[in-house]
Amino acid sequence: MNTLNLKVIRDIKARKGMFLAVTFIIFLGIAIFSSFYMSYMNLQETYNYFYEQTDFEDISINFNRAPEDIVKEIKKINGIKEVEGRISLKGFITIQNQRAVLKLISIPDEQPRVDKLVVVEGNYMAKNSKSVLLLKKFADYHDIRVGDVIHININGGEVRLEVSGLVYSPEFIWVVEESEFITTPRTFGIAYVPQKMLEEFGYKDEINEVKITVYDKRSRDEILNRALKILRPYTVINYYTVEDQPSNKLLKMDLDGFKELSILFPSFFLLISVFAVYVLLTRLIRSQSGNIAVLRALGVSKQTILQHYLKHSLFIGVSGSAVGVVVGHLSAIVLTAQYTAILNIPFYLTKVHYDVMAYGFIAGLTIPLISGFIAAKHAAELEILYGLKGYSEQTFRGIDVKRFSKLPVLVRLSIRNLFRNKKRTAYSTFSVIASIVLILSSMVFLDSMDQALDLQFNKVLAYDMDVKFNGYVNESLLKEIKSLKGVKEAYPLINTWILIERGGNSKSISLIGLEYQNLYKIYDDRGNIHMPPPEGLILPELISSNLSIVRQEKVEFLTEFGIRKAEVYDIIQIPLTPVSYANLDELQKILGIKGFNGVILNVDPDAREEVKSRLEKYKEVLRVDLIEDIEEDILELMSFFYIFIFFSLFFGASLGFASIFNTTTVNILERRREIATLKMLGYTTKELAYTLVIENFLLGLGGIVVGLPLGHLSARVFLNSFQSELYSIPFVIYPITYVLTIILVMVVLFVSLIPGIMYIHTMEIEKVTKEIVS
Amino acid sequence: MLKLDDVWKIYRMGVVDVVALKEVNLELGKKEFVVVLGPSGSGKTTLLNIIGGIDVPTKGRVVFNGLDISKLSENDLTLHRRRNIGFIFQFFNLIPTLTARENVMIAAELVKEPMDVEEVLGIVGLRKRADHFPSELSGGEQQRVAIARALVKKPPLILADEPTGSLDFETGKEVLKVMREINEKEGITIILVTHNSVIASMADRVIYLKDGRIDKIVENETPVDADELRW
């Protein structure tokens, strides 16, 4: 091996801690990028493959009821590949005294032409059989097996069905229950039953849903309009193309999140690595200026010196990014598997994404090479005479010495050290800032979510129990409910689903009709309470801005009772899921109905189970939810989210540690002569460590002063980028989070000092002096 | 081999011009052992740097084997140093992460036909210590490695700047002995800069510098062995 190359290896070996720290930063950046980006690609390919295999719908239209033959008419529309007409009804089953709502979907004797099912256990049902297929996750949750018999209540009647198979459907990779805050298999499932059986519930030769696939995706909107024209006479309730399909939309949002994170997070690391490589190489070059001068005097060319020092950054880049892409690939497999495990999908696809690996590798290589080039150029340009004079430690300049004359000497030393190498101090401060930004950008999700849930469960939903009926009921039932023992308060409400159409755009949204009461309050994201409007609707900002709707405008919307019109009374920013509100009486007038389809209750804590079970005995009751159960479900679903936050915090702290460790070590090595001198004078390790602690404390303080507002700002931007029309989380960072961030940053700063302090402790003064003299 | 013709070196220090060398005229032949003597600030190191091509004169010509090196580009100067010059410094300037052998090898790799590294290490008496790092060698041993590093390229000229300046008497003498041997056995011209006048007695020629000017040049008819030096 060429001796200069051998020197590269020895240089790295001699400073392995520092090289490792910088390589670790590159490694983390590339590993996060590869992991998230490959997960994004794996998931996208998994969904697409599943969609292809199952002929996933392009268009969906829901309507009240239409003759089955309407399918033939729709099929005539040019460009349509397949149409599947079906009946969709709501029912429920009771398992171990727990009621769960089932969305019952009719299926033909053979697999449907659109949204085919993947049977993973058992069989697709036999012709004319009294059997049912259940979505696997729902069956697993309730421990229902193939061959079990379940009793489903539909419109007050009960049917006995044998579970013939467990399935997955492209429609329900992510199960969403309309008008519900959260959907869990505990309370909601999907069941596929023979069409003939559902027809018995008032749908003889009729359907209320069509699912369509098209040949050319570009013609989707045109086909939708033509199909809507055919179906309008049958009271269209809802419609959407694949982009707005609830499950697909949520998956798409998550995919976008993965993609965004794969760029945003690693950018921090790669930006820090630019400085880290520069600081490391500059320090190396400065300490080797004598060697460089001798090599140049011996006849080594500038080019060779440049290449020599570039090889150091090449080592960092190659090792950091090579390990990074491999770890990224492996963790993408784990992440894809873990993520798909919480979804309703029978498989996941992973492969080696050579293109992503190549991008990651090139990025991880280029960045250290660029900053390495700047440092190596200094080495190549070093004047031989200057280098031969020997390396002189950084002198102190540029600050009024007298200003600190009253402080103890060791404190003065710490302050002046900060001004010694301003570039390095700036880099260290920047590292602290970047760590704070990363930590706050992760914590904002935790705090905002916590605040939003607190608002939702402790202020908005001040009731204990929520009853949903099969249809609309009247006052007499309310009176009965009010008279139940343990019921303190009960108020009726309407919870329905509307589709607002404006300027060719349409958005689905939940509409809640409320009386003036204290159990369900309308809050905006700033915590202001709004009363149900005396007339018209309150619309959420997310929907109104999307459809360019303004106050006092009359909007047209589809309801389960046909097309209706109402004035927009107010537009407010509603936290979490966007909901529109109306006064109950007003909504009854708008819809043209009497009665309500839900009741909210305040119940004596000791009587809750009893009231719930008594309510579930009413044939009109579809389901009863306890708010505390919903809250528990949410916390369970959030576990994946908490893991993500944990890793973000870990990355933020690692970034801070690796970069601060690097500069601290450089600082100590660069000043080892003066440290040796101070030790010689009789200063103890403890006293010398004290100067370093003061120095890092001041550094941290500077970083915190800039980092907190910057972190606050970036957290806001970061959170905003995750807001969608499906949910909006109000921005909150608790004061305690700022305090914890400061503590974490300070701990990282002090922990990164430990190796340096240990070096000072074990420093052999004579050896250092001799080394410097020679 | 080497001719300096009216060489001047003027440094600008702020608004003041400092004349480090003036009117230096000198001619050196092959295989000579020359000692440059003078007090601090007399221009000894500047003269050595200009001869070695790591500094350029402000005025005048430096001709090495017929080539005016004062007119060379930086690249050509690098090649000149590579082929023709070996340097020995007061503070050895060894690369701490390379062993003695590797410090010599790094110079050997610069030329097409270097001397055998083991042979050179043998010449300076370091074969047994070849695998030691500089921090494991004594000052004298480190300077011998520096001599081996200068010698291995087989340069016609070796320039030594205070090579005994950091060494004790006995070790210094050992180093001078090795240098004289190289001069005699390998036929390499050596210019040794020192402020120690005792060393002058082992030179073939002694150049006295004073205030940047050559004060006198003394031919030594009977140079003594390094062993006989006392200071």
Image (cartoon, coloured by chain):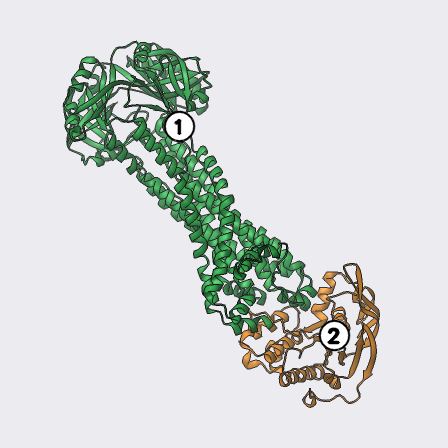
- A26 vs B66, left or right, is left
**Disc number placed over residue A102 in the picture, else none:** none
**Disc number placed over residue A525 in the picture, else none:** 1
Place of residue A158 in the rendered image (x, y in percent of width and height, measured from the top left): 15, 22
| Quarter that holds the C terminus of chain B | bottom right
Q: Residue at x 37, y 13 (%)?
A: A536
Q: Which chain is orange?
A: B
Element type at mark 2: loop
Element type at mark 1: loop
Q: Where A50 sits versus A705, above or below? A: above
- A422 vs B8, left or right, is left
Q: Which residue has dot 2 on it? A: B40
Which hue belongs to chain A? green
Quick one: B5 or A710, which is closer to the camera? A710
Q: Amino acid at mark 1?
A: Asp
Q: Where A485 sits versus A336, above or below? A: above
- A717 vs B175, left or right, is left
Marked residue chain, label 1? A
Place of residue A434 in the rendered image (x, y in percent of width and height, measured from the top left): 49, 46
Q: Amino acid at mark 2?
A: Ser
Image quadrant in which you'd find residue A37: top left
